[in-house]
Every structure is written in C-alpha cells, then in structure tokens.
Amino acid sequence: MSPNSLILADALLPARNQMALSLGAHIVLACFGMAMPAMIFVLHRRGLRGDDVALELAKRWSKVSGVLFAIGAVSGTILSFEMGLLWPGLMEQYGEVIGLAFALEGVSFFVEAIFLGIYVYGWGRLPGRAHILMLVPMIISGIAGSFFIVSVNAWMNAPTGFTEVDGVVVDVDPIRAIFNDAVLLQFLHMFLAAYMVAGFCIATIYAVGLLKGRNDRHHRLGFLVPLAFVAVATPLQPVVGHFAGQRIADDQPIKLAAIEGLAETEERVPTVLGGVWIDGELVGELEVPIEGLGSFLAQNSFDAEIIGLDAVPEDERPPVNIVRFSFQIMVGIGTALVGLIAWSAWGWFRNRDEFFSNTWRLRAFVLAGPAAIVAMETGWITTEVGRQPWIVHGLMRTEDAVTDGNWVWWTLIAMIVVYALLGLAGGAVLRSMTRRWAAGEHDLASPYGPSMDELDAARSERREVPA
Amino acid sequence: MSEAVAAIMFAAVILYAVFAGADFGSGTWDLVAGDARKGAATRRLIDRAIGPVWEAHHVWLIFILVFLWTGFPGPFGTIMRELAIPFWLVGLGIVLRGSGFAFRKYAPDIGWARVAGSTFALSSVVTPFFLGTIAGAIASGRVGTGAEGIIWLSPTSWIGGVLAVLTTTFLAGVFLAEEARRHGADDELRESLRKRAIVVGAVTGAVALAAVVPLQADAPTLADGLTGRGAPLIIASAFGGAMTLVLLQQGKLRSARVAAATAVAAVVAGWGFGQYPWVLVDAVTIEDGAANSTTLAGLLIASGVAAVIVIPALVLLYRLADSSQLGSSH
C-alpha cells in the first residue's frame, strides 16, 4: 500500500456507505416512477369508459406518483453529484466512455418530468383522450431511462467499448459501451423488479384496507390492478434472473464464486443453501442432493468447471458472507412471491368473492410489498458488493476512484439524518393523503388559503370538457 | 467539436439560470410572504406557477453535469474535488427544496405546511447562492490553479452568490406578477409583486454595476473577457434590465417577463463569452479539457435527439401552462 492509499482508504468506507444509502433510497422511488404510469394508464382507460371508481383511483395515484417523482428527481440529482463528489477517479478516467448513457438517460428523464407535469396538473383541464395520452411518453421514457442507467452499472460489471494504453483511455466506442454484454439481462431483471416493487407495495396498501373490512369496489380495483402487473412480472423474474446469473458466470466468475461460497475451482459443483463463510470455507451449509446442480445452473452442464475464489489473489475477492446472504435473501423472497402469485391465481379461479376476503392471503400481501423492496435491495447488494474490490470490473479498484476529501464522514452523517427525516415526513404526508381520501375528501386542498382554489374551481368548471 | 459541445452545455446553463432561476426565486417571495393567513394567496400563486414545471426545469442541471463529465471529464473531476463543499450544500438545498415543495402541497395541516414551506423557501434562497459561489470560483481562475484559501468564498464567489439570489428573485417577481395577472386572481397581490419586483430589479442592477470594480482586481481574466468579447452581451443585459423596469412601471407584465428573461440570459451568456476559451479559467481550455472526438460526436447527436424530443414537449408544457389548462391539481 502506498502512503497515499492509506488516506484514500479513510474515505472509502463512508463513501461506499453513502453511495449505498443514496442509491438504495433512490431506487425504490425510481421503481414507482417506472411502473406507476402504466398502472395509472390501465385505471384511467377504464375511467374513460365510464368507470368512476377507476377514474378516481387514477387521479389519486397520479397525485401520489407526483409526490414520489419529486422526491425521486432530487434524490437522483444527489446521485449524479455523488458520481463526481465521491468517485472523481471513476469519472475522470471513464466519464467519456459511459457518459453518453447518462446523457440519454437525461433526455428520458426530461421527457418524463415534462409529461408528469402535464399529466398530474391536467386533471379537469385537459380533455380525457388527450390527457390519458400524456401517460404514454412517461411510460416509454421511464423504461428508456432505466435502461440507460442500468447500462452504466452493467458496464461497470462488463466494461467494454474502449482500449486502455498506459492508463490512457483511447478508441472509445460509446455505443458499444452502452450495449455491453451485461446490459440486456441486467435491465430486464431491473425492469421486472420495478414492476414487482411498485405493484406489491400498492397491493400491500389495498390489502391493509381490505383486511380492515373496506371490501368495496374501490379497494378491490386498487388491489387487483397492481396484482395483474406483478402476476406477469413475478413468474418471469426467476427465469431472467437465471440467465443473468449465467451471464455473471462468464463476465464475473469471482462474483459467482462468492454467491456460491465456492472456495476452490471444481467440476460437478453442487448447489448449497445457507451456511456461513468462516476462514475460507462454508460452514453449516445444506447441499441440494442433485450432483452437479450448481455447475448445471451456471453452465448448462452437470460436469462443468466452476471457478472458485482461489482463482484470484485474496485482495481481489469480495466479502463472501454479505454477497451470499444477500443473494439467498433475494432468491428466497422471489421464490416466496412466485408462490404467493400461484396461491392468488388458485384463489382467483376458485372463488372470486372469497378472493378479496381471504384473510391469510391478504396478510401475506401485507408483507409482500416490503419483502419485494428487500429482495430488490439485496439484489443490488449482491451485484455491487460482489464486484468489489473493483468499481470497474478488473480495471479500477474502488479505493482508487474514491475522493480524497476529508468530509465524507460528515456528509454521510448529514445524509442519514436528512434522508431519515424525509422518509418520516414523506410517510406522514402520504398517510395523511390516504386518510383524507378515506374520509371522503377529493381535492386535498392545501392547508393554506382556499381563496384561489374556489376561483380555480369556478374557472375549470366553465372550461371542463366532457371526457 | 469540443467548442460545439461547450456551447450546448453553456446554453443549458443559460436555460437553467432563467427557468430554474425563476423557480428558485419564487422561494424568496414565499419566504417574505408573511404568516399563514397573509401569505396564503402568494403561496397558492407560487404553487400553481412552478408546480407543473419545476421538475422539468431542474433537468437542465442534470444535463449540465452530464455534459461536463462526459465532454470534459478531467475538468469535471477537478471541479468536484475542489468545490465539494459548495456542491454538497447545493445538493442539500436541492433535496430540501424539492421535497419541501412537494410535501407542502399535500401537508396534513397548517403546522406541517409551515415546516415544509419554510424548508422549501429557505433552501430556494440558499441553493442559488452556493451555485453562484461555484460559478465565481471557476470564473475567477481558482479551480485547478492551486489557488489558496477557501476558493469558493472569494470576492468573485460572493458576487456570484449574491447576484444569483438577486437575479432569481427579480425573475421570479416578474414571472409571478405576470402569473397573477393572467389568472386575474388578486389585483392587490399582482400590484404588490410588480412594485417590489421594480425595487429588486433596481438593486440587482446596482449590485451588478458595483461588482465591476472588485471583479477587475479579483478575477482579471474574466474582467477582461467581460469588457472585451462579452461586452455586447453585458450591455444587452443592462438594456434588458432597464427595459424590464420600464415595462413593469407601465404595467406591461407580459413583455416585462420577456425582457427580464433576456436580461438574465444575456448576463449569463456574457459570463460564458467572458471566460472563453477556458473551461476552468487560467487552468484548462475547452480544447485541452475535452474528451475524445467519438464521445463528443455522440454528445452532439444526443443533443440533436434531445432537441427533437424535448423542445416540442417543453413547448407543449408551456402552452398548456400559459393557457391555464394546467393549474393546481383539482
């Protein structure tokens, strides 16, 4: 270690934690930004065909998504600051390689912000057919934006689109960098995860209402629409995840070795569950009694050789326990959610009325939203911690990218405090919104001065175009 | 090609200064609007004026950052290393401003609304100040040159910060007066905004004039540029500002809005031309700091795509907002 890297190491721990906190918080909001417009579209479309309950739901969800989008916009800005503030080494060296993806994400975000402004503020002002169309660019730009952002992360896992000569980046091909080998599966995995997180979380909220005995059309519809989305996304997720795992076997065998807890390179590797990594070996694990299953899952052959952690020097291995626990939590929750969907499908086709009053299943749905968030977060921990000690796989160590600023502990503490307060405040505001709706309020007037509201209402009534 | 990318990036700086500037400046008016009862009309006006548009305006900042780190990765790294503290303060301000604004609208009761609202208002004033100090540090040749001391609290940074707060307040005053006129909401509010905007405009102009002297000593390269290449724009800005005051005096609010935006755009453009050809004044030129040509070409293409997609969408947003087809969501 050079004397310099000792100083850098000081900032590394708080910088990584700060990045984890800001990314972990933002990604939840991003899921809602991605998935909610499509769900609102379904409701709004029903509403235009005369379903007033659906229309009212679309209106409410658009207000909630407006609040979430605002917080997502500013928490996303923090992330773009952090790319430079926490990881200047990364951006100085590779900014020109991966920057185009960020630029295109910026375009997508722009479109989403513009049409969100039009849509959320267009209620009662735009004619119905034009109004619902404003959701379409939001849906498309949400998907496009997440593709470009995920492509940057995928590039860090499978860097490509340039050559490095004596530490200088040359022959940059930014298109190749965006469409790197890892992006497709990583994007699909995140795309489905976004619909699962948003869908299960919304279903959770309406499951709580149904459990409290509010078994009305409003709650049934609010429960059913997100459920329809997750019913498609959830069973697909393990399939995509499997192929994403095979991609890792090729691109980042050491990450896979950490996930599997595989100390030495072997053939006919089993699949093992649980266990703790102590002193270079897995202790207390359970082996699935199918010989070579691990090899088969990774390489489609029961005899395949799987690379173990011993293939690289010790200082190039990620912390096994964090990666392995995270991965298993993700897979465990994902499997449970597939089971919940299967149970729901069975219930749906057996007895529709009982479907909305089956206490045990509704209770499972109350847990499903938070569980989906945990699964997504542990998935990100798996891929991010699993890449360590690299920030760009095989090319740049995280400790060489981190800032040399002496302020990182302070900004980390400040962020913990600010984000905790925002989380509490946001929760309180959203709760109060739902309570006021439940109490029969429609418009949620701001608690200051109604005078302009009345004026607006009078004006918009005159203008209102029947849908 | 590096100059084309720099020009587009700076165009985004101008757009951010004008549009997001007016959104930020609304915070000042919110801050001084008085207690809950007295300030209600002003706050409702601000809600409806910036509610549908502020997130879109905010994206210009993301654009600038992305262009900087993609097109000029070296200078970006230097800026972020040396100006980390003011950038963190800007980041904090942006987070508090956005969430304060979003939470206030649906606040459960007036107590919550007060806390969220004052968070929004205060951070709206603080954020442009620190953005101004960042601009001042770069423009005075303190970034990447090994300058001593706290480089973002130099005289030029103070001028940048104070002028940022004043110009955003001025812009917002004019924009809000016009917004009040268009909705015919409250003659008293419109008149009070109009009169106070004249005062703020006059103060802003005086400060900008007075700044010339310290700038010559503190930021010689910039001062040369401002009086040389940038001079026509500085004159245009002064003219635009004076016009705004006249139009405000005459009550021609719609035209005043255009004149005020022109004045701010011209002064920011003047800064850009003033520090040309430097990205980091006295340290790195646009050409030396630029990325490889393939990436620059990619950025230009991305800008073209953005222009084709984003500009029509923005025009639609403004047309709807202007024709009051968008308003507070009821």
Image (cartoon, rainbow, N blue to C red):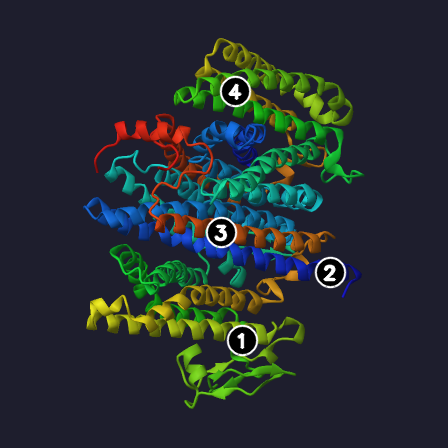
- What amino acid is at disc 1? Arg
* Chain-order first, disc 2 or disc 3: 2
Judged from the image, the secondary structure of the residue bearing numbered disc 1 is helix
- What amino acid is at disc 4? Leu
Please state which of the two labelled residues, at mark 4 or mark 3, is closer to the viewer.
3
The dot on residue A428 is: 3
Q: Which residue is drawn at 66% across and 20% down?
A: B208
Which residue corresponds to mark 1?
A324
The dot on residue B89 is: none
- Asked if the residues shown at circle 2 and circle 4 are in contact, with their CB atoms under 8 angstroms apart, the answer is no
Q: In which quarter of the image is residue B123?
A: top right
Dot 1 and dot 2 within a common chain: yes
Q: Which residue is drawn at 44% across and 44% down?
A: A109
Dot 3 and dot 1 within a common chain: yes
Alpha-carbon span between mark 3 and mark 1: 35 Å
Alpha-carbon span between mark 2 and mark 4: 51 Å
Which residue corresponds to mark 4?
B193
Judged from the image, the secondary structure of the residue bearing numbered disc 3 is helix
